[in-house]
Image (spheres, rainbow, N blue to C red):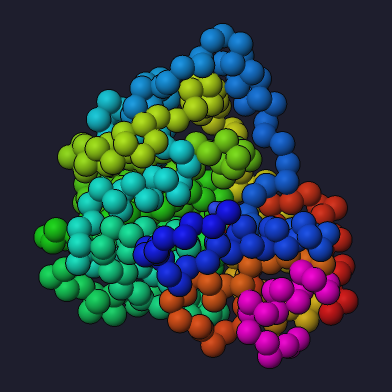
């Protein structure tokens, strides 16, 4: 079928997200899929049981718009315990259809035509389109491989009278960098006394390595009071397909958030929320996640030692960046395609997370996979 009228595209230059493109290419060429980030393993049987019993005990109708209250209460209790921040489950927590919807909704709720949003690139690919769709302008601070260091004094220079929001993401996708306490201190200095809000994407909050603690903006009152903090059950409980996450924000920001949320999703899967309300209390499930993935990170890095890939530091998330300087001069999109089709290992080229093409030749591998999968991938990659 074809629409014969004129379509004035909102995104004339935008194609399909790289995650969909690479996963499809991996399937087509029977490649090992280390591209799109999703775990290969089953959720904990306690979660499956909780979901099953939620289904069997009749939780099939709409959940409340802001989310199942016992789940919001459990999130508030967890937030207090982990980050020392008292949040009101009634007014300051909303359950969302995953991290991406939370991010979109927060942006749509506060960004007006002409507002500027500071975004650190490489940036997760949903930030800029959401800003542009509502008439805002992303202002990029470009970070460079291999260390992707933020010089906060330079960030300050990007601020103008139009700056409404700064988006931060730690642990960071795709660089695998984790904020230190001094990053948050510097950020505090920048926003103190301004009207600038923060959107803190913390979906990998439970995946940090080498005893590096996650630095949540929720652990600092001055930051928490101006932030939308986004988290995701998919990343923490190996169930990205359930599409459940949440956002925490001060009540006056949350009020604006819910005005948008109520008309773009209204509410989220009831049985999943009932299950998470139980499971979130089982602390071991999230407290053991870092060590679970640290074993995989170490295994994958060791297995690639003999290869010609250069491994960048990995401080958190389940992503490993690798430079292929020693292998090819090709641009990363081309290289990632070649790797999928000819070498049958799919990855993500990191230039798609920038608004310009960076000089570095770096791709991203997802290591949230069984050891056997990582072993095979590393063997194939080491032959190149
Ligand atoms: N967050 C996942 C990643 O970075 C992708 C999620 C998606 O495909 N939308 O790979």
Residue 24 picture quarter: bottom right
Q: Position of residue 267 (x, y in %)?
A: 40, 29
Dominant secondary structure (helix, strand or loop) of the stretch shown in magenta: helix
Image point 16% across, 68% down: which residue?
162
Image point 48% across, 23% down: which residue?
270
The residue stretch that appears in magenta: 326-343
Residue 121 picture quarter: bottom left
Q: Quadrant of the N terminus?
A: bottom right
Closer to the camera in the image, 140 or 137: 137
Compared across the picture, whether 193 is left or right of 251 comes to left
Closer to the camera in the image, 12 or 149: 12
Question: If the picture is divided into quarters, which one holds ligand 1?
Answer: bottom right
Compared across the picture, whether 139 is left or right of 380 comes to left
Q: Is residue 326 above or below residue 133?
A: below
Residue 343 in view here: yes
Residue 288 in view here: no
């Amino acid at each position: 079928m074809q629409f014969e009228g004129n379509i004035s595209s909102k995104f004339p230059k935008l194609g399909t997200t790289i995650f969909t493109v690479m996963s499809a290419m991996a399937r087509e060429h029977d490649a090992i899929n280390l591209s799109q980030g999703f775990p290969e393993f089953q959720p904990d049987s306690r979660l499956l049981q909780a979901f099953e019993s939620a289904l069997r005990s009749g939780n099939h109708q709409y959940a409340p718009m802001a989310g199942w209250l016992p789940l919001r209460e459990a999130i508030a209790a967890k937030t207090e315990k982990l980050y020392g921040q008292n949040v009101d489950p009634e007014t300051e927590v909303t359950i969302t259809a995953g991290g991406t919807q939370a991010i979109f909704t927060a942006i749509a709720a506060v960004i007006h035509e002409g507002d500027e949003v500071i975004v650190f690139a490489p940036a997760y690919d949903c930030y800029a389109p959401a800003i542009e769709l509502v008439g805002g302008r992303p202002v990029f601070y470009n970070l460079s491989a291999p260390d992707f260091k933020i010089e906060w004094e330079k960030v300050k220079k990007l601020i103008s009278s139009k700056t409404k929001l700064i988006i931060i993401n730690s642990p960071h996708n795709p660089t695998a960098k984790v904020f230190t306490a001094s990053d948050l201190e510097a950020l505090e200095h920048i926003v103190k006394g301004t009207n600038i809000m923060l959107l803190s994407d913390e979906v990998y909050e439970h995946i940090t390595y080498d005893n590096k603690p996650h630095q949540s903006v929720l652990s600092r009152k001055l930051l928490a009071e101006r932030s939308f903090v986004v988290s995701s059950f998919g990343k923490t409980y190996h169930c990205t397909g359930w599409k459940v996450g949440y956002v925490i924000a001060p009540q006056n920001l949350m009020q604006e958030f819910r005005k948008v949320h109520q008309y773009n999703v209204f509410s989220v899967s009831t049985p999943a929320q009932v299950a998470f309300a139980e499971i979130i209390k089982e602390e071991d499930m999230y407290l053991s996640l870092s060590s679970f993935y640290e074993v995989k990170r170490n295994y994958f890095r060791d297995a690639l030692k003999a290869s010609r890939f250069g491994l960048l530091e990995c401080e958190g998330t389940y992503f490993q960046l690798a430079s292929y300087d020693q292998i090819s001069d090709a641009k990363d999109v081309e290289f990632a395609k070649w790797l999928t089709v000819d070498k049958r290992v799919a990855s993500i080229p990191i230039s798609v997370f920038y608004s310009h093409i960076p000089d570095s030749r770096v791709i991203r591998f997802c290591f949230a996979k069984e050891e056997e999968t990582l072993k095979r991938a590393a063997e194939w990659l080491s032959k190149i």
